[in-house]
């Protein structure tokens, strides 16, 4: 479904909702394939907003180790506040 939305022009960096954006929601929920797809499609890996501020913080908060590692490998800012 995410791929279909992106193919139809959805803004990969749209802000809003409890999690802040799609990347942060996917990180929090543990959907690594979606995290990878969103980053591949240009999602701002360090975008801030939502309950825990960044995708890295979202993934860290709930122990999504493989997602945290992926985000770090793709230049997530460990000092974002």
Image: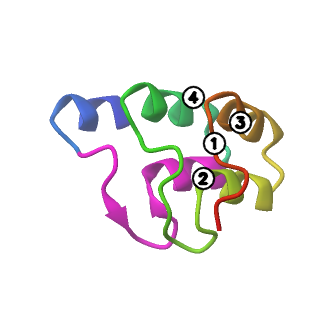
Q: What's the CA distance linking mark 2 and mark 4?
A: 14 Å
Q: Could you say which quadrant of the image residue 15 lies in?
A: bottom left
Q: Are marks 2 and 1 in contact (CB under 8 Å)?
A: yes
Q: Of marks 1 and 4, which one's residue comes earlier in the chain?
A: 4
- Residue 66 shown in magenta: no
Q: Are marks 3 and 1 in contact (CB under 8 Å)?
A: yes
* Residue that badge 4 annotates: 33
Q: What's the CA distance linking mark 2 and mark 3?
A: 10 Å
What residue is shown at x 54% (from left), y 28% (from top)?
A: 36
What residue is shown at x 65% (from left), y 48% (from top)?
A: 77
Residue 36 seen in this snapshot: yes
Query: Label 2 crowding class (10 Å Cα cut-off): few <14, some 14-19, many 20+?
Result: many
Q: Of marks 2 and 3, which one's residue comes earlier in the chain?
A: 2
Asked which secondary structure carries label 1, the reply is loop
Q: What's the CA distance linking mark 3 and mark 1?
A: 5 Å
Could you tell me residue 71's position as x and y percent?
A: 66, 37
Asked which secondary structure carries label 3, the reply is helix
Q: Of marks 2 and 1, which one's residue comes earlier in the chain?
A: 2
Q: What's the CA distance linking mark 2 and mark 1?
A: 8 Å
Q: Quadrant of the N terminus?
A: top left
* Residue that badge 1 annotates: 76
* Residue that badge 2 annotates: 55
* Residue that badge 3 annotates: 72
What residue is shown at x 57% (from left), y 28% (from top)?
A: 33
Query: Label 4 crowding class (10 Å Cα cut-off): few <14, some 14-19, many 20+?
Result: few
Instruction: Please give the range of residues in magenta.
Output: 11-29
Q: Are marks 2 and 4 in contact (CB under 8 Å)?
A: no
Residue 1 seen in this snapshot: no
As drawn, is 61 to the left or to the right of 47?
A: right
């Amino acid at each position: 479904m995410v791929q279909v939305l992106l193919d139809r022009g959805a803004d990969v960096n749209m802000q809003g909702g409890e999690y802040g954006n799609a990347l942060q929601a996917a990180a929090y929920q543990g959907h690594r394939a979606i995290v990878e797809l969103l980053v591949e499609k240009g999602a701002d890996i360090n975008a801030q907003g939502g309950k825990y501020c960044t995708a890295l913080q979202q993934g860290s908060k709930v122990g999504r180790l493989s997602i945290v590692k992926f985000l770090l490998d793709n230049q997530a800012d460990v000092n974002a506040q």
